[in-house]
Image (cartoon, grey):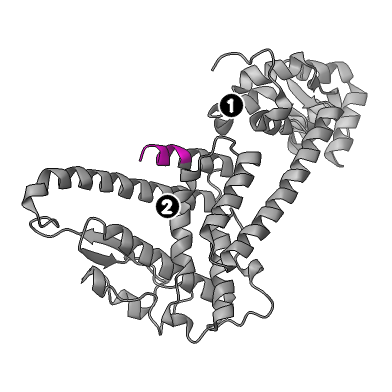
Amino acid sequence: MGKLPANFDWRKSLAAIDLLGKFIKPRNISQVMNWQYLQQSALNPKDAIERFIQEGLLINCDLDEILNCEFTASDLKKMAKEEGLKTTGSKAELVEQLVTANRSKMEKATGKLKIMKCTPQVREFVENFEQSKRQALEFAKQKTFDALLDGDVKETSKVFLAYHREYIMPEMEARYCEYQNEKLKFILTSAPKVLGNINSSDLASLRAATCISVLWYKESAENWLPESFVSPVKNNKVAINYLKVNAEIRENVARIGKYAKKVKLTFNEYDIESCDLCLRLNNKVFDLKDVPELPFENCTSETGCRCRVDNVYNEFNAYEDEDDAEDDVEGDAEDDTEDDAFIKLSQLKKMLDNELITNEEYQKKKSEILSRM
């Protein structure tokens, strides 16, 4: 990535606003430039930071800010002890007495550090942008929930995409939502018997709330259930789990059905969450049309069936027309690519849910995987 163009306007670049936002508080520039997700950004952090400094958007910090940014409370207490000073108090108090006692020594200790912060004007812009972003997010969540109550995946995708293009990833294409939309469709058509005689209104709310938790990062499905909702099982969380698991298993079976005629249900040998009814299915093979509805109607697990659905190929291949063998091989290769992408996307979502990657990293990597399909 080359230098930024002369007419580059940071106010119109989400990546630039995000980068400047890292300097709302004093930051060590060398540490920020080493952050992995920034290095993968379309905006070169080194070039951007150099431009920000040239334009006066980033300014040097005062000595007390540098000390507070770069050193922990333990570090400051150790430094205070070496100076024969009091070692109790807050970080700000420790910094103040160190600077007062020996300013020149503190300046020497921090002389090679490049700690900077954004100007008050930039800070105000970034904070206003973040406030608008939060408001837009809440508005988008509500609009998608209303659309999901009506079973309208198309409108849901439209709202979700508009928000992400404006505040997260301007280049996001509509096809990036296709994988997500498929998951929503299976949830919106799930009505497992394990939920008993749930009324239509509560089922619609449960479906929409469950979709919200899939659609929006870290959003709790329980928070979207109305106060009038009556759980047909032990509690709301269990009802959500049952619906989500049922949709996931149906989706996996449908996906495998594109290139195989049988599936095998397998359970992890250390599975302690699935109930005995489900565990009896371990390593059982079913024709696609005979796969039992899971979780079972009398499931006793609070998380639902945790099985993995694997494909099972026929001994002489799943295809019947030998004249189309060559075409089938090509089609099978494409399906394998789709299958690999599905697995990778599932693993990526688990990493996001476990906070191993940021939402920005998740969206970028998801786009890369889908673009190769």
For image coordinates 78% across by 33% down, the residue present is 25
Marker disc for residue 34? 1
Question: x%, y% of residue 281?
Answer: 27, 74
Amino acid bearing label 1: Asn
The residue at which mark 2 appears reads as 346
In the image, taking residue 201 as reference, residue 295 lies left or right, namely left
Query: Please, is residue 330 above or below residue 117 in the view?
Result: below
- Give yes or no for contact between labels 2 and 1 (Cβ–Cβ under 8 Å): no
Residue occupying the far right of the picture: 100
Query: Magenta: predominant secondary structure element?
Result: helix
The answer to whether residue 20 is magenta is: no
Is any atom of residue 113 visible in this view?
A: no
Give the extent of the magenta segment.
367-373
Tell me the mark number nearer the camera, choosing from 2 and 1. 2
Residue 368 belongs to the span the image colors magenta: yes
Q: Residue at x 75, y 17 (%)?
A: 53
Snapshot quadrant of residue 267: bottom left
Residue drawn 37% across the image and 62% down it: 251
First-in-chain label (2 vs 1): 1
Residue 124 screen position, x and y as percent: 84, 34
- Please tell me whether residue 92 is drawn above or below residue 293 in the rendered image: above
In the image, is residue 109 above or below residue 280? Answer: above
Image height of 49 relative to 65, above or below: above
Type of amino acid under label 2: Ser
Q: Position of residue 356 (x, y in %)?
A: 53, 46
Query: Helix, strand or loop at disc 2?
Result: helix
Give coordinates of residue 115: x percent, y percent.
75, 23
